[in-house]
Amino acid sequence: MPITWIEPSIAHPGAQQNKLALFDQYTKQFQSADLVVIANPLWNLSVPTRLKAWIDTICRAGVTFRYTAEGEAEGLVTDKTVVHLQASGGHFGQQDPASLYIAGMFQFLGCTTHTLAAEGMDHEPDRAGEIMEEALRRVRELARSL
């Protein structure tokens, strides 16, 4: 069955139009950025809900990804670099669900992704400052290479 695009101004009244306009604004901002930096804490092995909501607004079929004739998804944002910075209390080696989600979503959109983590601050509270300093050193090193 073919998919038919419904013009938003026809299909959605009032408040829904305002939400669509805001989503368009977020998507255009994302598309026009040279570099996207996402910094978040690891919350219950996930990302904060506002970050998830933002990602949901920019993942748009026909805009930031498309389906090929074979039904495969293809990212349309291939000129974008995303840097993901995450702080967590435990040690996960960037294999926690939140890190994998962020990397997977932006790779799905076609972006080049880099992930840096400051891990173990609750596990080793006496080293929290040292852990953050090391993470900041790696951030600066990555920034010089981009």
Image (tube, helix red, strand yellow):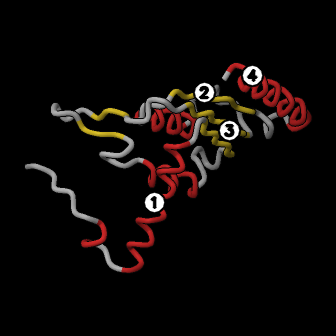
Q: Amino acid at mark 1?
A: Phe
**Viewer-side label of 2, 1:** 1
The residue carrying mark 4 is: 144
Callouts 4 and 2 close, C-beta under 8 Å:
no
C-alpha separation, residue under disc 4 versus residue under disc 2: 13 Å
What is the number of the mark on residue 114? 2
C-alpha separation, residue under disc 2 versus residue under disc 1: 25 Å
Q: Earlier in the sequence, mark 3 or mark 4?
A: 3
Q: Quadrant of residue 49?
A: bottom right
Crowding near the residue tagged with mark 3, few <14, some 14–19, many ≥20 C-alpha atoms within 10 Å: many
Left/right of residue 103 with respect to residue 8 in the rendered view:
right
Q: Earlier in the sequence, mark 3 or mark 2?
A: 3
Left/right of residue 46 with respect to residue 107 in the rendered view:
right
Q: Amino acid at mark 2?
A: His
Callouts 3 and 4 close, C-beta under 8 Å:
no
**Viewer-side label of 3, 4:** 4
C-alpha separation, residue under disc 3 versus residue under disc 4: 19 Å
Q: Earlier in the sequence, mark 3 or mark 1?
A: 1
**Viewer-side label of 4, 2:** 4
Q: Earlier in the sequence, mark 2 or mark 1?
A: 1
